[in-house]
Image (cartoon, rainbow, N blue to C red):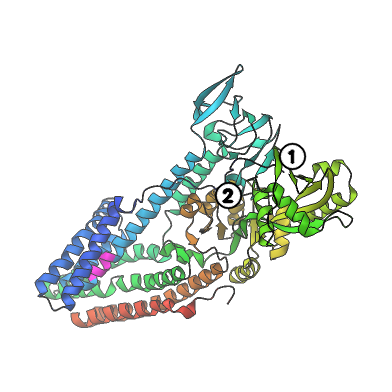
């Protein structure tokens, strides 16, 4: 154990620097907002009884503002001899206006413009967070060159260079310690809740925070190959791959769109060839295009998904898109990080054990230790002080406080010389009772520190990262939702991981993982045919969140990069809500199937009527619009509060 007399970085995952909101800097957002405003104004004018030319003008302006970009993009795709569903939607919207249904067409325009804006915003946020990760590593490093110090760019460090890292500085490169001792907060890389003692021969990572000691390091990797740099690369590659994901129905719509266009041309041309009049053939073709257009199919899909998103948001879970909500229900296995996900992410005193023959009981032992640790700002010291205050203990005056890097603290309290140290000294002294206490606590995955009075060990304090109260029932619910046991992926040590797994009901445990190891574990599960939903919170989880089929971040403690790499965010840090969101996704997918059946029956009926008989255009529009309204209302059922069923319910 080590302590610090100066302020140390928190053991919680480090955050990338906050950046100015990019929302209004995106043209897609501005166009979508303009289209929505015009649509609302047009609706108000129509409801208020304004002259038809006025609200028509507003609706057509909505067409122009929100539709020009997808129309242009669709035309570019058309130049490559492909048909984009957005272009068909624009054509359908124009067709709706041509037969007097300008409101419906404007609504389609707003839906597609908003979807494009959300996609652009999510893409920009992820890119900004990835760039912010580079700020973790310092720009400058203190290079030791023939006994002299000089400042150089951290990016210019070469393998074999020796650098000096002073207390409180960030480590500029991956390397090995060659001189000195300190504690290093490497939660951003491994997720460990406590700083790790480092001495000669130990490995350190760029971007992690040095504690109170002075370290001399030998660089072992160039800046482009550091762990932080690899995190950036992994997040960018995985995000680019995931950005190409579509809703299943969108893939169907692309083929359906081509079929509708070909069929519409055939419905127009063939009657002309057999002698039907131009006006009759055109009217039949227009009716066919209206009744066969995928408007009802689009609304069969989006209302259930958007309703599920709104319901989840109301209960503290933000799902970033309809694609994500659909994918949540396809997950077949859940992978969980440990620190900050299943635990609170900070150490807590969980046991106070005094020697039976010692001079003080447990309460006095904790009071003396807390008084000695009061001047320290090391996470262990803060946890001991917090535990004493939680018991209502008043801290005693302290004299002669001293912190020894890598050893512990000592102080004079109430006439006693109090020392709090790592178990090493007690083990070396072969104090049997203390060694047994330490072994017992460490076997449970806890961190043990020894308290000595006047040079004699008298007790042990055990610390651990406290498990979230909802962790065990949440894991049981996730198991039930996916029909497969969740897996624990953590950078923490195997003993701590195994102890936590036993407490929450997990048996598949993979510990000591670096960020790239977590990505490899995700890919291994995917190669086995699993669709992986991963839950994490820190920078070290970001690559795996991006690589998983669905990534979910714990919002309260999550780093900026984790939050933007993830597809969904649990804002209130209640893991029990995740199974409720998965159930919402399952429910939404079932409603989508229902809606598609309804839409298919109506479209098929109207198309056959139009082809073999004479379907009046107003009746075709009424049938088409009626089915659209029906499937939309069916999807809105997921807004009901009764649809939300968390693990604790």
Q: Main secondary structure of the magenta part?
A: helix
646 inside magenta stretch: no
**Residue 223 to residue 335: above or below:** above
**Residue 261 visible in the displayed image:** no
Camera-nearest residue between 535 and 380 = 380
Q: Position of residue 101 (x, y in %)?
A: 19, 74
Q: Is 395 left, or right, of 127 in this rendering?
A: right
Give the structural element (helix, strand or loop) at label 1: loop
**Quarter placement of the C terminus:** bottom right
- Residue holding disc 1: 407
Height in image: 597 above or below 125?
below
Residue 83: numbered disc: none
Say which element carries label 2: helix
Q: CA distance from mark 2 to mark 1?
A: 36 Å
Question: Is residue 107 highlighted in magenta?
Answer: yes
The residue carrying pointer 1 sits among few (fewer than 14), some (14 to 19) or many (20 or more) residues within 10 Å by Cα, namely: many
Q: Is residue 66 above or below residue 13?
A: below
Q: Residue at x 32, y 78 (%)?
A: 604
Q: Position of residue 261 (x, y in %)?
A: 26, 65
Mark 2, residue position: 519
Q: Is residue 196 left or right of residue 133?
A: right
- Quadrant position of the N terminus in the picture: top right
Residue range highlighted in magenta: 105-110
Q: Are marks 2 and 1 in contact (CB under 8 Å)?
A: no
Residue for point 34% across, 50% down: 22
Out of 435 and 388, give the one closest to the viewer. 388
Task: Determine the residue positioned at 58% across, 49% down.
Answer: 519
Give how far across and how far down residue 528 sits, in percent: 61, 57
Q: Position of residue 299 (x, y in %)?
A: 34, 72
Q: Quarter-wise, where is residue 207 in the image?
A: top right
The answer to whether residue 453 shows anywhere in this view is: yes
């Amino acid at each position: 154990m080590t302590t610090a007399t100066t302020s140390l970085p928190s053991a919680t995952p480090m955050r990338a620097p906050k950046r100015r909101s990019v929302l209004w800097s995106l043209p897609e957002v501005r166009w979508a907002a303009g289209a929505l405003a015009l649509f609302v104004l047009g609706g108000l004018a129509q409801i208020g009884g304004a002259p038809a030319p006025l609200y028509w003008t507003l609706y057509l302006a909505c067409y122009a503002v929100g539709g020009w970009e997808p129309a242009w993009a669709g035309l570019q795709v058309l130049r490559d001899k492909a048909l984009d569903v957005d272009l068909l939607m624009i054509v359908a919207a124009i067709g709706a206006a041509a037969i007097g249904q300008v409101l419906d067409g404007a609504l389609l325009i707003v839906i597609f413009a908003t979807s494009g804006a959300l996609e652009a915003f999510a893409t920009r946020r992820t890119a900004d967070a990835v760039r912010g990760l580079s700020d973790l590593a310092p720009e400058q490093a203190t290079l030791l060159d023939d006994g002299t110090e000089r400042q150089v760019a951290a990016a210019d460090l070469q393998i074999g260079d020796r650098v000096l890292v002073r207390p409180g500085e960030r480590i500029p490169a991956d390397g090995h310690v060659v001189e000195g001792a300190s504690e290093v907060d490497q939660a951003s890389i491994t997720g460990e809740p406590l700083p790790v003692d480092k001495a000669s021969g130990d490995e350190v990572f760029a971007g992690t925070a040095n504690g109170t000691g002075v370290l001399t390091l030998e660089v072992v990797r160039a800046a482009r190959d550091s762990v932080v740099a690899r995190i950036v690369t992994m997040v960018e590659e995985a995000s680019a791959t995931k950005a190409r994901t579509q809703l299943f129905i969108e893939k169907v719509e692309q083929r359906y769109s081509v079929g509708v266009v070909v069929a519409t041309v055939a419905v127009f041309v063939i009657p002309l060839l057999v002698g039907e009049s131009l006006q009759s053939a055109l009217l039949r073709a227009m009716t066919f295009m209206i009744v066969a257009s995928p408007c009802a199919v689009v609304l069969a899909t989006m209302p259930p998904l958007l309703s599920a998103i709104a319901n989840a948001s109301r209960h503290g879970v933000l799902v970033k898109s309809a694609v994500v909500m659909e994918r949540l229900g396809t997950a077949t296995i859940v992978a969980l990080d440990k620190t900050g996900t299943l635990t609170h992410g900070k150490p807590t005193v969980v046991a106070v054990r005094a020697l039976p023959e010692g001079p003080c009981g447990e309460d006095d032992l904790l009071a003396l230790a807390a008084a000695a640790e009061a001047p320290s700002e090391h996470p262990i010291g803060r946890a001991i002080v917090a535990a004493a205050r939680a018991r209502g203990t008043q801290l005693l005056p302290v004299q002669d406080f001293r912190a020894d890097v890598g050893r512990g603290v000592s102080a004079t309290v109430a006439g006693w010389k109090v020392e709090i140290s790592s178990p090493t000294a007690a083990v070396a002294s072969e104090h049997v009772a203390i060694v047994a206490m330490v072994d017992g606590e460490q076997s449970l995955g806890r961190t043990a520190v020894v308290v000595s009075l006047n040079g004699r060990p008298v007790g042990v304090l055990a610390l651990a990262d406290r498990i979230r109260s909802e962790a065990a029932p949440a894991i049981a619910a996730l198991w039930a939702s996916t029909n497969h046991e969740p897996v624990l992926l953590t950078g923490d040590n195997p003993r701590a991981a195994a102890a936590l797994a036993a407490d929450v009901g997990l048996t598949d445990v993979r510990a000591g993982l670096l960020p790239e190891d977590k990505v490899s574990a995700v890919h291994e599960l995917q190669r086995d045919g699993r669709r992986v939903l991963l839950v994490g919170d820190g920078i070290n989880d970001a690559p795996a969140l991006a690589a998983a089929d669905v990534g979910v971040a714990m919002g309260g403690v999550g780093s900026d990069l984790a939050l933007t790499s993830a597809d969904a965010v649990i804002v209130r840090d209640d893991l029990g809500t995740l199974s409720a969101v998965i159930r919402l996704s399952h429910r939404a997918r079932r409603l989508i199937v229902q809606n598609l059946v309804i839409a298919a029956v109506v479209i098929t009926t109207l198309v056959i009527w139009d082809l073999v008989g004479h379907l009046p255009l107003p009746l075709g529009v009424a049938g088409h619009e009626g089915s659209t309204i029906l499937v939309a209302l069916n999807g809105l059922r997921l807004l009901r509060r009764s649809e939300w069923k968390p693990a604790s319910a």
